[in-house]
Image (cartoon, rainbow, N blue to C red):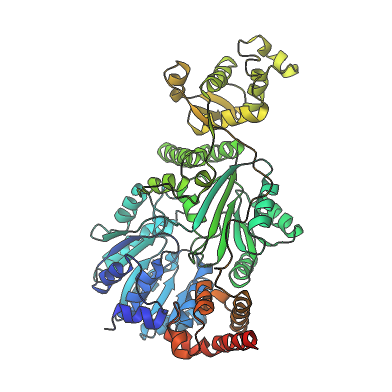
Amino acid sequence: MTSPLTVLQTVFGYPAFRPLQEAVVQRLVDGEDALVLMPTGGGKSLCYQVPALVRPGCGIVISPLIALMQDQVDALRELGVRAAYLNSSLDSATAQTVEQALANGQLDLLYIAPERLVQNRMLDLLQRADIALFAIDEAHCVSQWGHDFRADYLQLSLLHERFPAVPRIALTATADARTRQEIITRLDLEGAEKFIAGFDRPNIRYRIALKQNPKQQLLRFLKAEHPRDAGIVYCLSRKKVEETALWLQQEGYNALPYHAGLPAALRSSHQSRFLREDAVIMVATIAFGMGIDKPDVRFVAHLDLPKTIEAYYQETGRAGRDGLPADAWLVYGLQDVLKLRQMMDNSEGSAEHKRAEQQRLNAMLGLCEITTCRRQALLHYFGDDLPQPCGNCDTCLEPVPTWDGTEAARMALSAVYRTGQRFGVNHLIEVLRGIENDRIFQYDHHCLPTFGVGKALDNHQWRSVFRQLVAGGYLTADLERFGALRLQDKCRGLLKGEETLQLRKDIARKATRQQTRQPLPEEVDVGLWEALRECRRSLAETQGIPPYIIFHDRTLQDMCAQLPRDIAAFGRLSGVGERKRDKYGRDFLRVIEQHLEQSTA
């Protein structure tokens, strides 16, 4: 057997394994099972790709998204790896050719959609082939408590039954303790060694703000910080996706819509453009993103509140996979909370499932309303600890002012109670502020003790109070009464004077922000950087592949910093394996040579 480190260096061009990778790889090389939790961009794919190349036979990768298999296979073929995929996008003749290659031992890695893998015909073919390992990617899809549940994954326990001697590895970037246990149970991985890397992505800056004018907030963010960057904007509905994409196009951005209601060919085209072109903004529902391998996504923006911290972590994790600075930006409001809770109440899940979903939404709201370090709270949710505040989230960079909201909260709760728990936020604010109108007189609410007691606060401040009471579990919305607020048991202590409440002091953000990231390190020559990017773009366009499959931005930065002058020095750059050294070295060395000549002329 070739050693794993040799494969890593000669095929993938990396000098050493990252933390945990080496132990995971050795576990699989030794023929044992593994469960791997590693953050997006942490190098999960190498955990099964390297042992698949070390062990005899073909590595089988179960991947949930057909559209992404081709991209992953293209990247492997660029490295000289014999890779292919089998899914419903192939015609019968092409699929037969791939199956024959598997049977003849001519493949190193084969990507298969789960629904195809569990077919008897496919299982019979695998039984006759020489299999190195099974890799179950995005393993959280097996959990009915998770955010990306896929029923086909529930059948994957058959791998252990049908292929007991073949090692299996299940991988995910997002799983709390409950989801981890379900993965182990459903995939029959009780004997697997668990490898849990830290969940921290220190290069991502987390920022969460209240909705004021969401489109203008997004526009200011893009103009100030990401005018020419690739990014993803997530929206809750298909209609909002299309409206936002069109609006961004009108504002001069290269924005594309993506949701499950679009024709498959159009979705595929938009995804291909996002992966292959520079500075494309994908506006999408959560139908887009799982397994996205584009390293230079510089921001992920949410125009609506994600319903769980798992979903938020998974979606924001698509930013900055190359390790360079990136932004996770979110705006939310009370209406987001009410809409998500309505969707949950109207779902067909069991009462237990609905309760679990409500708890997860409450945790997401808690992350939004927190006044301390967001990264510490986010990591704590996944059982990971950060001893000190991160210094790279909005609450660290701009500490949140708070105020004693105890008395205001009691007024708000009293107004809910005295109006019969039958009215929404707008009417309750009118009662508290003493607004005299037909609706107030219709219900005799001008006679209530709470009428006009809250004149000291304006509409914006009262909305903040109600939003934080809902987020804190003191109030909930009765969706059968069009969002009427109802008291929860938690409010008893507050109403009885047994506890106090500190609330966020919501302050309108400034219209502009300072640039928060340096696009390039100071030592990088911008002229050479652009010349290398143009060389990469031209080579990628000729081959019909995304530029990052040739080299990541980090490798181009290494070229700028180290200025290799010969093929041996070029081969020592991070991310340059033997295959890419021989295939592209001369092209990039020529660009460097020309730049140096012009600099000294």
> Residue 229 in the image: x percent, y percent?
62, 64
Above or below 499: residue 394: below
Position of residue 275 measured from the top left corner of the image (x, y, whole percent): 58, 69
In the rendered image, the residue lying farthest to the front is 600
x and y, in percent, of residue 455 in the image: 66, 19
Closer-to-camera residue (401/582)? 401
**Quadrant holding the C terminus:** bottom right
Residue 357 is left or right of residue 253, and the answer is left
301 or 221: which is nearer to us? Answer: 221
Vertical comparison of 303 with 371: above or below: below
Work out whether residue 469 can be spotted: yes
Q: Is residue 169 above or below residue 353?
A: below
Q: Quadrant of residue 106?
A: bottom left
Instruction: Return the residue nearer the eye: 17 or 39.
Output: 17
- Residue at 38%, 83% (x, y): give it: 10
Residue 272 shown left or right of residue 119 in the figure: right
Q: Which quarter of the figure is the N terminus placed in?
A: bottom left
> For residue 153, which quarter of the picture?
bottom left
Residue 454, picture quadrant: top right
Q: Is residue 388 above or below residue 533?
A: above
Residue in the foreground of this view, choosing between 429 and 553: 553
- Residue 128 in view in this figure: no
Question: What is the count of numbered marks?
Answer: 0
Residue 223 rendering spot, x and y as whole percentages: 68, 56
